[in-house]
Amino acid sequence: MRTLIPVAVLVLALTGCTPKKIPGTDLDDTSETRAVIDVLQKYRVAVESKNTDALLKLTDESFRDDGGSSAPEDDLDYASLPGKLAARMSKVSELKLDVTVRRIEFDTEEKVARVTYSYQLSFKMPDYSSRTQSENDIKQMLLKRVGEQEWKITSGI
């Protein structure tokens, strides 16, 4: 019995030291994690509502994205983002985006976060088909901290 008490105290102490997780995820429940998840939530809402102004407010002036290809015509930067997003979004309707954050890696020295997320997107392209299209994949989004708690997207839309 004497050895059981110290073991129980040790187990309780170690259990209390494990980081609290955001319910339903493996993500540590920290203010930084919640701030980054908030950006992804705002991104989802902006995409669904085709709100290019809201998307632009979520991006940093250093934003650059190669669209996942070597073709320059799908490249985006902060200056071209409003026009190219508006053109792309004008071709789709009934947008529905589900985003699930899988992992967030923080580099506190560089003040950046790499977010790995999966998404499911459904939409219609009335000019091409009346059928609902869908796409799902795993992507990464890069964000940088601006100020104390604000995060801005630098790549990965």
Image (tube, grey):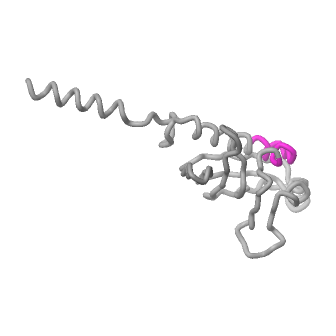
Residue 117 visible in the displayed image = no
Q: Quadrant of residue 34?
A: top right
Report the magenta residues as a range.
Answer: 45-56
Q: Quadrant of residue 66?
A: bottom right
Task: Check the image and report above or below for 143 versus 14.
Answer: below
- Characterize the magenta stretch by its predominant secondary structure: helix
Residue 85 image position (x, y, % from top left): 86, 56
- Could you tell me which quadrant the N terminus lies in? top left
Task: Check the image and report above or below for 99 versus 4.
Answer: below
Residue 102 image position (x, y, % from top left): 55, 49
**Residue at horizontal 81 percent and vertical 63 percent from the top:** 76
**Residue at horizontal 83 percent and vertical 48 percent from the top:** 56
- Could you tell me which quadrant the C terminus lies in? bottom right
**Residue at horizontal 78 percent and vertical 53 percent from the top:** 132
Q: Inspect the magenta stretch and tell me whether residue 52 lies in it.
A: yes
Task: Check the image and report above or below for 55 versus 138.
Answer: above
